[in-house]
Amino acid sequence: MDKIIIKGGRRLEGRIPISGAKNSALTLLPCALLTDEPLTLRNLPRLADVDGFGHLLNQLGVSTMIEGARPEDFGRVMTLRASRLTSNVAPYDMVRKMRASILVLGPLLARAGEATVSLPGGCAIGNRPIDLHLKALEALGAEIELTAGYVRAIAPQGGLRGGHIHFPVVSVGATENALMASVLAKGETVIDNAAREPEIVDLCRCLVAMGAHIEGIGSEKLIVHGRDRLHGATYRVMPDRIEAGSYACAAAITGGSVDLVGANADDMTAILDVLMQAGATVEVRKDVIHVSATGRLKPVNISTAPYPGFPTDMQAQFMAMLALADGVSVLTETIFENRYMHVPELARMGADIQVTGRSAVVRGVDKLVGAPVMATDLRASMSLILAGLVADGETQVSRIYHLDRGYERLEEKLQAVGADIERIGSD
Ligand code: EPZ
């Protein structure tokens, strides 16, 4: 398995291009199931999860064509076409590798009238149930059966019917499945307490480009007027706010000065606010966010929350950054029950972090020391990279397949702004 080796101590300076958003791409790809016409997605990030999702869609009968991208380009153009579905089963061996596969459930049910998807199971950060996804589909008239590790959903005769969906807990994925199922349902669907993440807005905009009729986009109350059919479209994936936030932390932790090119600051208000509270300088220009820092950062208390609150996907990265702050920070993870897997690894590098329940008390230390560490999940891996960028000596990060799921050509982007970082294949 590959490793990443970092020799810490370099200030990062220069421009980092921000790729298309992983968590938008993974909900835009299954939209291809909703029509027999071509859906072209631009600015798709080159990520393991995007490739994996493409293979799953191929398994269902969707053709996927990557348009010519030069090796040096970031992002790709993919045209997908579900002329005729050849299967409505998403098998265990594919779903277990990528839990976002559950996002074929809603569109498959809407298009084909039935869908069988392996239960995704848990992952490193929590047990990740899908009860809210299933309740939403039942509200549209679907019958749900759970057998032998699979969920089977069947639409009523005549197809799904509009209904009233109320989410007791904000869920990004359940909102996405509800949206993709309701756009072809007969009648009106109201989704209350819908997730408001920018990726949900991106999904709504892509569905509207395909002919869907959705009101309240960006709010917690979405009203979907079902259509008999949707048509093809060409749609550009939004920039990745979590990738941008992660590299903003890299600039801050190294006392650097970096331009995040292509990022959308409007999607990142909570992230940029906390960066400035910690003492970083943030300047927003047209589609470039400039982040710089000098001297030691200040401690900050953070509590994760659904959008527009501070994103859980940035908690691990900020913890690495605050491990060197001049004081004590308290981080509270309210979304997932086990999202502190990075703590013991950061501790190996000298961080002083105490976890009690959902909160982590981070006492800033004067320095971190490079060490061999192990990635456990996607965002935890990034927190180890950030620590390695500033630690004394060499850090070796193993199991970096986690990183490849969410960060396009990470070491190239960091090398280009001065980091001493390389990927080595282990024997
Ligand atoms: C999406 O996961 C993202 N993944 C996650 O990003 C992100 O952390 C999360 O939203 C929260 O913002 C993708 O978009 C592919 P949820 P999702 O449903 O949809 C509970 C990353 O690092 N819940 O909003 O799975 C759940 O257990 C990944 O890029 C239920 O109880 O998250 C959690 O506590 C990690 N029942 C909370 O809701 C359900 O049916 C929020 O989960 C669904 C969720």
Image: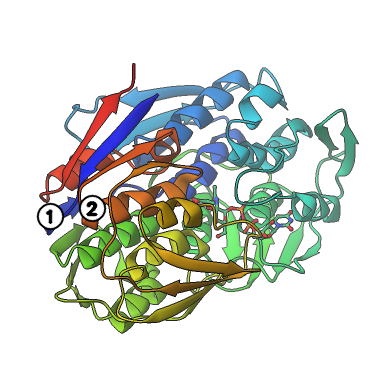
Q: Which mark is residue 78?
A: none
Q: Secondary structure at mark 1?
A: loop
Q: Which residue is mark 2?
A: 389
Which colouring convention does the figure follow? rainbow
> Is 71 displayed left or right of 40 in the figure?
left
Name the residue located 31 percent from the left edge and 55 percent from the top edge.
Answer: 387
Q: Position of residue 171 (x, y in %)?
A: 66, 60
Label 1 CA crowd tier, 10 Å (few <14, some 14–19, many 20+): some
Whether pointer 2 and pointer 1 mark residues with C-beta atoms closer than 8 Å, the reply is: yes
* Residue that carries the numbered disc 1 in the rendered image: 10
Q: Position of residue 144 (x, y in %)?
A: 88, 41
Residue at 46 percent of width and 46 percent of height: 378
Amino acid type at image mark 1 = Arg
Location of residue 262 with respect to 4 vertically, above or below: below
Position of 290 with respect to 135 (left or right) is left
The answer to whether 360 is drawn above or below residue 241 in the figure is: below
Q: Is residue 333 visible?
A: no
**Whole-percent x, y for residue 245 in the image:** 33, 62
Q: Is residue 259 above or below residue 232?
A: below
Where does the C terminus fall, quadrant-wise?
Answer: top left
Nearer-N-terminus badge (2/1): 1
Amino acid type at image mark 2: Leu
Quarter of the rendering occupied by the N terminus? top left
Number of other residues with Cα within 10 Å of mark 2, as a class: few under 14, some 14 to 19, many 20 or more: many
**Along the horizontal axis of the image, is 265 left or right of 134?**
left
**Relative image position of residue 75 (x, y in whole percent):** 29, 38
User: Quick check: can you spot residue 274?
Assistant: yes
Q: Who's the residue at 54% across and 52% down the image?
A: 341
Label 2, label 1: how many angstroms apart (C-alpha)? Answer: 7 Å
Using the rendered view, name the quadrant where residue 145 is placed.
top right
Q: Quadrant of ligand 1?
A: bottom right
